[in-house]
Image: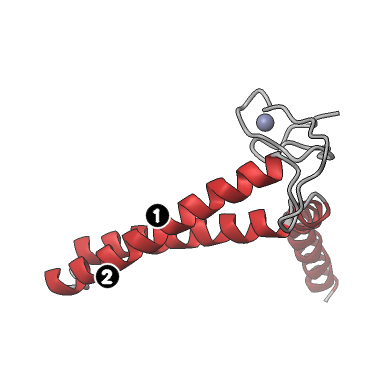
Amino acid sequence: MTLLLLSAVLASLAAFYVVRPILARRTAVVVDAAPGALLDAEAKRRSTLAALKELEYDYLGGKLDQADYLAQRDRLSYEALAAMRAAETAQAQAGAGVVDGIVPREVGTAAHGCGFVNPPASRFCAGCGKRLR
Ligand SMILES: [Zn+2]
């Protein structure tokens, strides 16, 4: 009985040890959030590219015939291209300090060493995650 209790406690501690960094990271991402338009555009870009990649895998794995694959690839390629353009526009606007279409009078931004242009008040680089100030 004691051994069972001890093993249950150890399993709980191990599970907490494994899950703790995941929970901590999720909190940090929410705190250092970029402007909403940039996050939406980036999420759309990533999801369309992931869907395109999954379509390729499905086709190569034999789950889709060629006609379906070509039709879906054309549609997803168009969506991915539009999403990439929207993400670039949103990133450029966020870099210029534009929030919801409002352009500030004075803009003081510079690209980080990794090349990502962050909003002026950023404490961390959204491109590489390093501390900016
Ligand atoms: Zn960076």
Q: For residue 81, which numbered disc appears in the image? A: 1
The residue at 47%/51% (across/down) is 84
Q: Amino acid at mark 2?
A: Gln
Q: Quadrant of residue 72?
A: bottom left
Q: Amino acid at mark 1?
A: Leu
x, y percentage for residue 69? 21, 68
- The crowding category of the residue bearing disc 2, from other C-alpha atoms within 10 Å (few below 14, some 14 to 19, many at least 20), is some
* Outermost residue, bottom side: 1
The residue at 55%/51% (across/down) is 87
Q: How many marks?
A: 2
Q: Quadrant of the C terminus?
A: top right
Along the line of sight, the residue nearer the viewer: 132 or 118:
118
**Which quadrant of the figure shows ligand 1?**
top right
Q: For residue 9, which numbered disc appears in the image? A: none
Mark 1–mark 2 CB contact (< 8 Å): no
Q: Quadrant of residue 30?
A: bottom right
* Outermost residue, top side: 113
Mark 1: secondary structure: helix
Of badges 1 and 2, the one in the foreground is 1
The residue at 71%/39% (across/down) is 96
x, y percentage for residue 76? 34, 64
- Please give the residue where the numbered disc 2 appears in the rendered image: 72
The alpha-carbon separation of the residues under discs 1 and 2 comes to 14 Å
Mark 2: secondary structure: helix
Is residue 71 shown left or right of residue 108?
A: left
